[in-house]
Image (cartoon, rainbow, N blue to C red):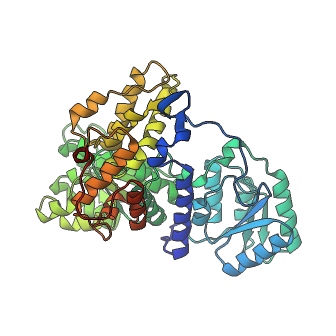
């Protein structure tokens, strides 16, 4: 089933609301140095391992059972809400499965009342997504059609009840009570579904959230996506995030790095070949487009595809058909394409180094992935994530990092982006003999000059980063090219940060080095 593009204002507001809640639960760069993060016995250090806290219900129901209703008909949602509240139960309603998945919750619902036919992600597809996330929610399906095969499929997949509209109110309330009685919450079920959906993507910066919002919008469609970003920014992670939210999530995901294949072999890799098609073709080969049939093909470094091969790629994108090398038989495929590049395809097209028509075909929905230097506030979160990952692999327990070390990591420009940071943290974990992460600060200083050699706290780093951006924008804060846009912040948020950091609102800004 093809997904319809999420375009409603309400859907976007729900997603934004979910991310705001998510952001509140995770520390930002400034919060990373707040007193509660420090080891009281070892001042000047930041905790890398989260302290265990007692599990308390954090939703508005204070532990009371909650019923979630997902139905695209507003009148049905209103009627179901009134009925369920009349039984003394809490209820929250959603117009689509996407809104439900984007909702940030401290616990799974006591019961889920779900319409089968929904725009975009269907009720049965949502049931499948929840099962993949290992979330066991009692589900009651509602349908306007007495579809026996569908009901059998739903019940086999674990649905509690399957009711046909118009249903008896008493039957629905009895089913809801059965669901509440059956709902035994396991700790892992308290996982935030929105977080699960984006897997290993770590960060709360506005710049990253803007990317994830775009992922939410385009993923349910069948449109081609072009990921633009520097090397190491995580383009494949974003491609997988698109896959996870799409209707093809349980179908093949085939990837190919076009820059890693010699140009003479790239056509065979993409489209396959017949035995004897060329010297060395001793057997038939199935290409990546055939392997991805029914699923998604991720072409990384698409800007490295030779000009002579680009017309064939354009044809398969437009017509969904091609021929293997050495064959006249046309093969039709159903493939959703996600392409990625660190090159400026528009400039290449202008210079005739890339076909303009192919560029337009790839550029249906471009997503720019910000470099790590534009999301400095995510660095402490990435450090924590990577330290925990590599420490577990190496059977080490690393709990703290010095404030000066974290500040140095935040000041560094990271030309290799997230991938460079990962490799640096892995090396640091290898070299750390105790619970305090040891980083080679000299490596960072020797590699690329940092903005300030006197900023020793994360607050200094943040202040210097804002000052540098203000200097680059000649003091302009708002607008498309202002400092707020460059930093991925709202204008009011930037003004608030400037006030907190003692940066006055004028057009001549000096650095920390000049101050000292």
Residue 197 appears at what percent x and percent y? 54, 52
Residue 198 seen in this snapshot: yes
Counting from the top left corner in percent of width and height, residue 3 is at 51, 67
Position of the N terminus by quadrant: bottom right
Q: Residue furthest left?
A: 351
Question: Would you place residue 10 above or below residue 515 in this image?
Answer: below
Left or right of residue 267: residue 105: right
As rendered, which of 490 and 15 lies closer to the eye? 490
Q: Is residue 427 found left or right of 515 in the rendered image?
A: right
Picture quadrant where residue 407 is located: top left
Count all numbered tags in the image, as a single digit: 0
The quarter of the displayed image where residue 354 is located: bottom left
The quarter in which the C terminus is drawn is top left
- Residue at horizontal 50%, vertical 54%? 244
Can residue 272 be seen by looking at this rendering?
no
Give coordinates of residue 109: x percent, y percent.
72, 57
Q: Residue furthest top?
A: 433
Q: Residue at x 22, y 34 (%)?
A: 447
- Looking at this view, is 11 or 425 the one in front? 425
């Amino acid at each position: 089933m093809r997904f319809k593009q999420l375009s409603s204002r309400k859907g976007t507001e729900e997603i934004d609301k979910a991310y705001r809640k998510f952001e509140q639960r995770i520390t930002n760069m400034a919060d990373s140095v707040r007193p509660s993060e420090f080891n009281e016995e070892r001042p000047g250090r930041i905790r890398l391992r989260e302290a265990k806290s007692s599990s308390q219900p954090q939703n508005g129901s204070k532990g009371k059972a909650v019923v979630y209703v997902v139905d695209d008909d507003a009148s049905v949602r209103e009627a179901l809400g009134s009925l369920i509240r009349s039984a003394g139960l809490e209820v929250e309603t959603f117009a689509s499965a996407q809104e439900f998945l984007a909702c940030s919750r401290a616990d799974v619902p006591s019961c889920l009342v779900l319409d089968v036919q929904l725009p975009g992600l269907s009720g049965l597809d949502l049931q499948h997504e929840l099962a993949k996330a290992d979330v066991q929610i009692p589900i009651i399906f509602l349908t306007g059609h007495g579809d026996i095969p569908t009901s059998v499929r739903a019940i086999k997949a674990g649905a509690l009840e399957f009711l046909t509209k118009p249903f008896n109110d008493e039957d629905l309330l009895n089913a809801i009570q059965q669901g509440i009685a059956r709902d035994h919450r396991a700790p892992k079920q308290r996982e935030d579904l929105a977080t699960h959906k984006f897997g290993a993507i770590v960060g709360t910066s506005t710049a990253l959230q803007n990317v994830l919002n775009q992922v939410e919008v385009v993923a349910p469609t069948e449109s081609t996506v072009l990921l633009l970003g520097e090397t190491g920014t995580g383009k494949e992670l974003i491609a997988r995030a698109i896959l996870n939210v799409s209707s093809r999530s349980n179908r093949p995901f085939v990837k190919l790095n076009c820059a890693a294949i010699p140009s003479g072999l790239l056509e065979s890799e993409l489209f396959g070949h017949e035995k004897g098609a060329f010297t060395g073709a001793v057997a038939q080969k199935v290409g990546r487009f055939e392997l991805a049939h029914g699923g998604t093909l991720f072409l990384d470094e698409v800007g490295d595809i030779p000009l002579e091969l680009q017309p064939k790629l354009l044809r398969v994108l437009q017509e969904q058909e091609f021929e293997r090398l050495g064959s006249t038989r046309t093969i039709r495929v159903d493939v959703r394409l996600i392409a990625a590049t660190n090159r400026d395809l528009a400039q290449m097209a202008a210079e005739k180094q890339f076909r303009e028509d192919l560029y337009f075909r790839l550029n249906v929905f471009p997503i720019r992935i910000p470099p790590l230097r534009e999301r400095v506030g995510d660095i402490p979160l990435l450090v924590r994530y990577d330290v925990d990952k590599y420490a577990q692999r190496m059977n080490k327990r690393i709990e703290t990092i010095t404030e000066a070390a974290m500040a140095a990591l935040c000041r560094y420009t990271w030309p290799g982006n997230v991938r460079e940071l990962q490799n640096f943290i892995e090396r640091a974990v290898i070299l750390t003999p105790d619970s305090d992460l040891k980083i080679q600060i000299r490596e960072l200083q020797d590699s690329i000059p940092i903005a300030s050699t006197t900023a020793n706290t994360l607050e200094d780093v943040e202040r210097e980063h804002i000052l540098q951006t203000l200097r680059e924008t000649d003091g302009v804060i708002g607008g498309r090219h202002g400092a707020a846009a460059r930093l991925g912040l709202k204008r009011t948020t930037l003004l608030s940060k400037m006030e907190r950091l003692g940066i006055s609102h004028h057009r001549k800004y000096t650095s920390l080095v000049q101050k000292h």
